[in-house]
Amino acid sequence: MDYKSAGVDIEAGYRSVALMKEYVERTMRPEVMGGLGGFSGAFSLSKIKNMEEPVLLSGTDGVGTKLKLAFLMDRHDTVGIDCVAMCVNDVACAGGEPLFFLDYIACGKNVPEKIAQIVKGVCDGCEQAGAALIGGETAEMPGFYPEDEYDLAGFAVGVSDKKDLITGESIRPGDALIGIASSGVHSNGFSLVRKVFDVSAENLREYIPSLGETLGDALLRPTKIYVRALRSVREAGVRIRGCSHVTGGGFYENIPRMLPDGVRAQVRKDSYEVPAVFRLLQERGQIEEQMMYNTFNMGIGMVLAVAEADAEKTIRALESAGEKAYRIGTVLEGEKGVELC
């Protein structure tokens, strides 16, 4: 008996690494020391030595049950973007520049071509974020995962000068709330999504006229990465006073996370058009409106709080960076929370 007969193919692991190398190389930054395959990833901190008080920021997350759609559609080259986005958006939300990323893939059977496609998506996400993929792990776990399934999680590290951190402490009544459009459902709420649509390979192939595409294409669209968008705002000379990454928990849970005590966010629901995929979800699932805003991003993936005088400048900077941005509300005095009107 050997390891392969127990379900773990070491040679497949070697082939996975060989296939993913070309993708990983695209993410390299000058600070990366060494190559793929070492026991740890090394990253030089020489670039940050000129900061007054450098602060490391980190984020970790996974893709969640959105992976079930990738399994059904046998499409594995975009979920890696979701994994990176969920981590680097949190880092950027605090004012950080993502530096490097590590991924973890656990699978029932190592199919090198599939693993390489997953890692290709991770590398695409890293390129969008400007982060280097400096390491990772592929764990073949027969008997724990079904042969055709896997889990995917990641970890990002970024840096910011302490004076440039976005903490929310400077948010004041009268500040403007700017929403940056999402690319769709992103990577949260899929347990409810899967229940509403009773997802199967067949109905994911259904063309939905209101969406202008198949249901599967709409739902599997990867999470938008906002690193460059937030950088464009800073480069325009705008001080971002607060930032909220709208993930699981939607508006009601995430927007208050950026607020200091004594202020509340008032968001106007009519300030932008809610994307069709959310209207379809609400209709088919007969979901109450409050639950929709308490579960999904509803078309807004990131919310910024800026001084009222900087509102238009912020929107112009975001639009110049290729983003759709909206003035969605105002900060008011009151108990910390969010009011939708």
Image (cartoon, grey):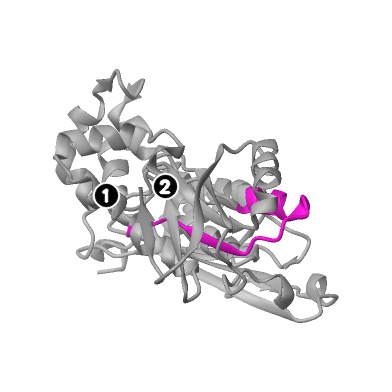
Give the image location of residue 98, x and y in percent: 63, 63
Along the line of sight, which residue is nearer the eye, 228 or 206? 228
Check disc 2: other Cα within 10 Å, few if <14, some if 14-19, many if 20+: many
Check disc 1: other Cα within 10 Å, few if <14, some if 14-19, many if 20+: many
Q: How many marks?
A: 2
Give the image location of residue 331, x and y in percent: 51, 60
Q: Amino acid at mark 2?
A: Val
Q: Reply above or below: 335 against 85.
A: below
Residue 39 in the magenta stretch? The answer is no
Mark 1 = which residue?
Answer: 190
Give the image location of residue 47, x and y in percent: 81, 70
The answer to whether residue 198 of the structure is visible from this angle is no
Q: Are marks 2 and 1 in contact (CB under 8 Å)?
A: no
Give the magenta range.
Answer: 227-249
Image point 29% across, 68% down: which residue? 2
Specify the farthest residue to the bottom.
53
Mark 2 = which residue?
Answer: 79
Give the image location of residue 336, x and y in percent: 41, 70
244 vs 251, left or right, is right
The answer to whether residue 64 of the structure is visible from this angle is yes
252 vs 136, left or right, is left
The N terminus appears in which quarter of the rendering? bottom left
Label 2 and label 1: CA atoms lie apart by 13 Å
Which sits earlier in the primary sequence, circle 2 or circle 1?
Answer: 2
Residue 239 in the magenta stretch? The answer is yes
Image point 44% across, 69% down: which residue? 257
Image point 45% across, 46% down: which residue? 300
